[in-house]
Every structure is written in C-alpha cells, then in structure tokens.
Amino acid sequence: MTISPVTDEHTAALVDFFLALPEEDRTFIQEDVGDPDAVRSLLATRVQQWVAVDDAGRIGGYVAVKSRPGWSDHVGDIRLVVDPAHRRTGVGRELARHALAAAITDGRRKIVVELTADQEHAVAMFATLGFTGEALLRDHIRDRNGHLRDMLMLAHFVDDSWGSMETLGLAEELGD
C-alpha cells in the first residue's frame, strides 16, 4: 500500500471504498459516507486527507486531520477508516502515523481521536503511537439500530511526548 494525499482522481475510488464498508462501520463515521454527494463534499473541504492505495488503485484506508477553530486551534482531530480486509495488517497504523506527523508538522500541540470504547485493537494501536485516554463519554453514540455506545477520546500531547524523548536523549538524534 502506498500512502498519498487525496486528489480528485481518488474521488470515485473513495466513494466506492466508503460504500463498501459494513453498515456498522459507517455508523461510527461522523459524516454520512453512505451518500456519494456527502463523500464528494468531504473531499472538497480544506482538510488534510490521505489514502492507502494498492497497486490496482483500490483504497484500503483513509485518514484525515481536522483542525479545530478558535480557542482549540492547537488541537487536531484524526479520523481513520480502514477496510476490514486490511485491518491488523499495519495499514491503519501507517495512516495514523502519517496523520500524526502531519498534524505535528502543522503546529498542532494536541491530537485527539474518538473511538467507540469497544474498538480494542484500534485503542491499542493508537496507544503504541503515544495516545492516552482523555475521556470516556457514556452512551454518547447512537448506532443505526438505536443502541447507545460509549465513546472513548484518546489524546496525544506533543509537548509531553517530545519532553520524554529529550529525557531519553532521542530528541538530539531526531534533529531537535
């Protein structure tokens, strides 16, 4: 899989990608990605977005970093979606790492991701990237069947992570 910025050429493949997701997965995406017009609108926003594409041009994953406005403009939200066939293969981790690095380069000091509390593999993957539990919001998400689910917010604090690297002497090696 190759990670590349989303371009107009990805639009049709991304519509297909989102429409092929299981209904349960689409429930937990804030945008209505089951609607091709909503996907096109999402892609037209000025948000940092990348896709993981295989050699045949099929999309295996999507990630975006959304900046928050106003007093939270130092915070970036990561939105990550991986095709079920590519989960636990490293695609999600590479997309998340890419988004995290871009958010830090763009000056974000805190990066957050929102997940359902039962997405244990995703929580563990984000933990390996330095994310920690920030909040548990009980019954915060209603799925398409009307069931309420808990939402977990994970956060990556850039300054804390960099401080830890400096303590271990890694900051100099990384080009402080």
Image (tube, grey):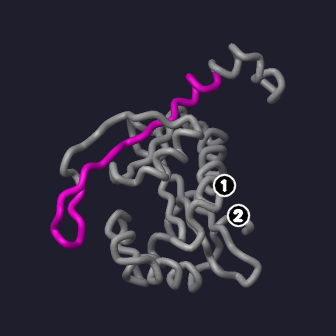
The residue at the far left in this view is 146
Q: Are marks 2 and 1 in contact (CB under 8 Å)?
A: yes
**Residue drawn where x is 50% and y is 44% of the image:** 124
Q: Label 1 sits on what residue type?
A: Glu
Classify residue 62 by image quadrant: bottom right
Badge number at residue 115: none
Viewer-side label of 2, 1: 1
**73 in relation to 7, above or below:** above
The x and y percentages for residue 64 are 53, 58
Placement of 102 over or under 4, stated as above or below: above
Looking at the image, the residue that sits furthest to the top is 167
Q: Position of residue 158 (x, y in %)?
A: 57, 30
Q: Position of residue 52 (x, y in %)?
A: 66, 68
Q: Is residue 63 left or right of residue 97?
A: left
Find the distance from the CA under tag 2 to the CA under tag 1: 8 Å
The stretch in magenta equals 141-162
What's under tag 2, amino acid-wise? Ile
* Secondary element at tag 2: strand
Which mark is drawn over residue 3? 2
Q: Give the labeled residue for mark 1.
A: 94
Q: Is residue 99 above or below residue 133?
A: below
| Magenta stretch contains residue 159 | yes
Residue at 76% from the left image edge and 79% from the top image edge: 55
Which one is nearer the viewer's eye here, 166 or 75? 166
Q: Tell me the quadrant of the picture where the C terminus can be found.
A: top right
128 left or right, relative to 117:
right
